[in-house]
Structures are given as C-alpha cells and as structure tokens.
Amino acid sequence: MRLFTAIDLPKEMLEKLGTFLARLSSFGKLRWTAVENLHITTKFIGEWPEGRLEEIKSALRGVSQTEAIRISVRSVGWFPDSRRPHVFWAGVDGGVPLIKLAGATEQAVAALGVPVDARAYSPHLTLARVKYAVPLDDLRTAAGDPDFGAFEAASFFLYLSSNGKYSKLAEFPLNS
C-alpha cells in the first residue's frame, strides 16, 4: 500500500484552482494534476504493509494539534527552480501550526520505521509536472500572481494512492 497524509482543500478553493488550471491547460507539455487530486501533503509515507494499517492509524491518532490551522493558497512557482523546472506549484502558507503538524506526523510514523525526510517541509500544491522543456515566459505571464483564498483546516487524512487515484482511509481531527 502506498500511503501519505494530507489536508483536503475546500470545494470553493478547488473550483478556483480548477478554473485556473483550465485557463493554463493550453500549455500542453505539462502533465496537469487533476483538480480532485489536489491536496496539501503533510507526510509521504510510501509503501506500507496492509497488515500493519491499524498500527499506522493508531500512530497518527496520537498526533496532537490543539486547534484548526489557517491556511492560505496563493502564488505559483517551480521546483527546483525556473531554470530546471520539474514541478509547477501553488504556494501554501499555514505558518508554524502547519509546520508543527508535519513535524509531529513525521515523528509519529518514524517511530514505526518510516524513513524521515531529509528535506525541510515545503508545503505546496503540485499543479503540474514538467516532462519536457517548456518556454516558461508565456506560462508565467498567463499564470500571473494568483490568490486562491484561505481556509481553516480542521482535520488531516490518511490516504491510499493507487493507480493515480487517492482514497481516504482515516480522518484525524486537529482539535483533539
């Protein structure tokens, strides 16, 4: 089982992102993310034995967060940078509470043997993946400097990723 934890986006924000992505879809050399697959990953777990699913759910239930997290989504950019783009992303700002949630999730699953990510947590929405070199100037102009809004995240989820589809396996409230 290929697992990850994530925060869902509200319907209104997904609609704004869908309109934005539809407007940019003519830049066909990018592999666009389906709107229904957009989420804020807090921890990529990777392959996990199905027989140990309850164990990981139990560890995630132990992640403590005392309040909902205010998250804003705005601006766009490239990983690793605009000279060698591999990912076109929208910026996510959840401040210290989001970073703490990601860290607590990392620690909870690391106790079960999930490898700790060596990179610093960098919250974002993956809008597209770059397969071939693309002229970025036109895309940058078309994208502009978008602001998709803000919301309160009240929970995070454990997801299964299989054949390009994501399925929720469990929900974890943030005010526990």
Image (cartoon, rainbow, N blue to C red):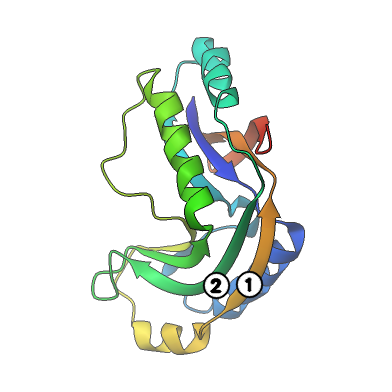
Residue at the far right in the pictured view: 12
Judge by depth and name the residue closer to the eye, 110 or 41.
Answer: 110
Image quadrant in which the C terminus is located: top right
Question: Which three-letter amino acid code belongs to the residue tagged 2?
Answer: Arg
Q: Which residue is disc 1 drawn over?
A: 148
The picture places residue 84, in percent across and down from the top left corner, at 24, 70
Work out whether residue 103 or residue 66 is closer to the camera in this orientation and state it: 66
Secondary element under disc 1, as helix, strand or loop, is: strand
Marks 1 and 2, how far apart in space?
Answer: 5 Å
Whether 23 is drawn above or below 21: the answer is below
Element class at badge 2:
strand
Category of crowding for the residue at label 2, using alpha-carbon neighbours closer than 10 angstroms: few (below 14), some (14–19), many (at least 20):
some
Q: Position of residue 20 (x, y in %)?
A: 61, 75
Tag 2 residue: 74
| Residue at the far top in the pictured view | 51
Residue 117, given in percent of the width and then of the height, sits at 31, 39
How many labels sit on residues? 2
> Height in image: 176 above or below 9?
above
Q: Position of residue 65 (x, y in %)?
A: 59, 37
Task: Decide if residue 44 is on the left or right side of residue 51.
Answer: left
User: Nearest the camera: 17 or 33?
Assistant: 17
Pointers 1 and 2 in contact (C-beta within 8 Å): yes
Q: Residue at x 60, y 80 (%)?
A: 23
Q: Is residue 91 left or right of residue 18?
A: left
Q: Is residue 53 visible?
A: yes
Q: Mark 1 or mark 2: which comes first in sequence? A: 2
Mark 1 Cα shell of 10 Å, populated few (<14), some (14-19), many (≥20): many
Residue at 57 percent of width and 67 percent of height:
73
The residue positioned 40% from the left and 29% from the top of the image is: 107
The structure residue drawn at horizontal position 51% and vertical position 62%, both measured from the top left corner, is: 92
